Image (tube, rainbow, N blue to C red):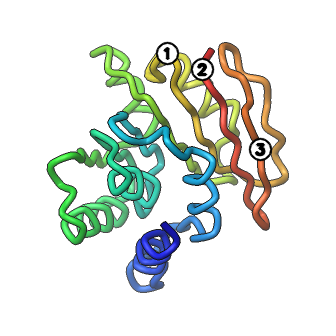
Amino acid sequence: MTEMVQRISSRTRRGEKTRGLRPTAARTLESVFNMLQGEIAERTVLDLFAGTGAFGIIALKKEASLAVFADSSREAQRQIRKALAQYHLEERAIVFHEDAFHFLNRVSKDGRTYDIIFADPPYDLYSIQKVAGAILDAGVLAPGGVLVFEHSKFEAPPELDGLTLRRSRVFGDTTISIWDRI
């Protein structure tokens, strides 16, 4: 897996290709997928605040049945579509150029749920509580689902109604927190 993650991470970290985006480090990505070992195949994934789309793309490479990407940046949408084409993953992916909160509001109305939700909002704009609250209010995390949240190490993972904190791990200035839906 290390080689695949390094390839995807290095592809999405090139400065000229990631203007305004904050790619997740390869070490962090690898650790997240190690923590989710055996939980990805045949599951539906939402990559919220998708940025370069690394979480969703790796999930697809690990046999997720569907990955949905939502990000308000046109650059993010372009990068994600390019990476999906490079890895021949377009048929199992849907990319939305849409604000995460609008996306959640819209999909909550059609009853769509996701088995695994990756959320990586801009640290300085949105708290875990605000984003996780919107996810839970929208009802898009499937029963038995997993919420993976990338956030600042300066923000402690809160208690979230209906979710149990499985693990929280710090990587430099970043923390990855994983909750399971009860």
Quadrant in the rendering for residue 54: bottom left
Which residue sits at x=32%, y=68%? 79
Residues under labels 1 and 3: Cα distance? 21 Å
Name above or below for residue 46 compared with residue 88. Answer: above
Q: Image quadrant for the C terminus?
A: top right
Lateral position of residue 163 relative to residue 72, left or right: right
Asked if disc 1 and disc 3 are in contact, CB closer than 8 Å, the reply is no
Identify which residue, 100 or 165, lies in the foreground: 165
Residue type at mark 2?
Arg
Earlier in the chain: of badge 1 and badge 2, it is 1
Give me the disc on residue 168: 3
Total numbered labels: 3
Earlier in the chain: of badge 1 and badge 3, it is 1
Across and down, in percent, residue 26 comes to: 57, 71
Lateral position of residue 132 relative to residue 159, left or right: left
Residues under labels 1 and 2: Cα distance? 6 Å
Give me the disc on residue 181: 2
